[in-house]
Amino acid sequence: MREHEVFDGSSEWDSVLRDGLCLNRNAPKIERKYFIKRTETNAGDYEYRASYVVGAQWVDTQAKRHIPVIIEPKIPGIDFMKMFMTCFSSNVAADRLAKIYGIDFDAEPISSNALENILSPLIISHFVTIVKKLLAKGLKKGYIGIEENLNKIKGRINIKQNDKTNTCRKRINRFYCDFQEFSENTPENQLIKRALIFSKSVLAQHGGNETADAVVSIIGRCISAMWQVDGNISPAKIKVMKRNKLFKEYNDALRLARLILKRYDYNIDNTAGRITAVPPFWIDMPLLYELYVYGLLDKAYPGDIIYQAPGNSGFPDFISRSAGMILDTKYIPGIIDDKIDTAIIRQLSGYARDTKLLERMGRGEADVVPCTLIYPRLTDTTANNFDKPLPELCEPIAGYSRFYKICVNLPTISNG
């Protein structure tokens, strides 16, 4: 299936599927994500549709249990790695980024060649950006145990090993010692470096585009910066490694490193083969698009964009301080430029009259605040990199005062 397509051709209520396949049933109702959702049609009927979430899931229905369902993007050839790197490189809080996707490695895999080109770049992009931040701060050091045959005593002599290595061979000037050193070569850093080596190998096999090559270059620099760290940690050590509550970024890096290594069964030779099955996973395309646009805006207008400012009426995606403008993304690839839904107009109008948001923009209640809708098109492949002041990029929306639109398409492999 593709995003928003009708599922199973049935409009009847399904007693097993109910309101749809919810991916986070325990979340507040407004934050719930659906893989398949029962929605009302324009004619007032109901039908089950794929949502704007891509990925693979097992779906149970009244007629048939355990159906493997794969939802692909409406826009073909999306450069997911470029989107992920743009998102993860922004200053958005880690808990927001974590809501972009979910993976269930414990569930039965689903056969799919196509989705492997989405899943691996997703995990690797997130991992690489976190490692870059860790390296910028400096690797965490710790005491590590070392065994070494020395010409002087350091720490304590390992009697058993010393007898075997030195005494029996009459090496009276050598001592086999156990000691500790304060070093970057900790098991945690070894795991990170091992996953970087795997990631580089994966992209070399499955990459082949400009973005993948750029990420390979970043990985190479990260590996070089960890020259003091051994990258040959054993799977047994990886599986018993514990979390450290004081180092959240390290925990995120270690979690993703494990995912990468587990994906290829801890065997770097496996990265050369083609994976034909993926674990059940999902990607929230509206949130991915929102954070991708934020990454572009933040880079183009540093210090000017406020993300998710709290107001009385909700949280607009962005506020531009310099333009005094409300901006909101809508991931609706099939939207028609001259037929903007009035519900979208009403939502942005509410933000433009919100006293808390007006105060953040330095505006008064008498001001008519410009509102801008940011959206992608299905057919237009023109990239928009925000290379001009925001007001110059805005196109008026006919029939509304100071309402504008900006088309920001998703990057594709063909157009970069």
Image (cartoon, rainbow, N blue to C red):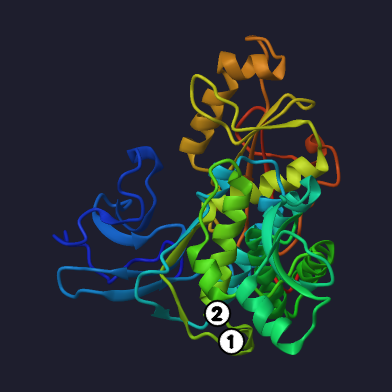
Displayed quadrant of residue 27: top left
CA neighbours of label 1 inside 10 A, class few (<14), some (14 to 19), many (20+): some
| Residue 21 location (% of width, % of height) | 30, 59
Residue sitting nearer the eye, 73 or 281: 281
Residue displayed at 70% across by 77% down: 203
411 sits to left or right of 18? right
Give the residue pinned by disc 2. Answer: 264
Residue drawn 74% across the image and 48% down it: 296
Label 2 Cα neighbours within 10 Å, binned few <14 / some 14-19 / many ≥20: some
- Where is residue 349, by image quadrant? top right
Residue in front for this viewpoint, 193 or 43: 193
Q: Quadrant of the N terminus?
A: bottom left
Along the viewing direction, whichever of 82 and 370 lies nearer the viewer = 82
Secondary structure of residue under mark 1: helix
Is 400 rendered above or below residue 192?
above
Q: Mark 1 points at which residue?
A: 270
Residue 188: x and y, percent? 63, 59
Say if mark 1 contacts mark 2, CB within 8 Å.
yes
Residue 73 visible? The answer is no
Horizontal side of residue 392 vs 364, given as left or right: right
319 is higher (above) or lower (below) than 64:
above
Q: Nearer the viewer, residue 337 or 192?
A: 192
Per the model, the C-alpha gap separating discs 1 and 2 is: 6 Å
The answer to which image quadrant residue 46 occupies is: bottom left
For the question of whether residue 20 can be seen, the reply is yes
Q: Is 313 above or below relative to 241?
A: above
At label 1, the amino acid type is Asn
Q: Which amino acid does label 2 sit on?
A: Tyr
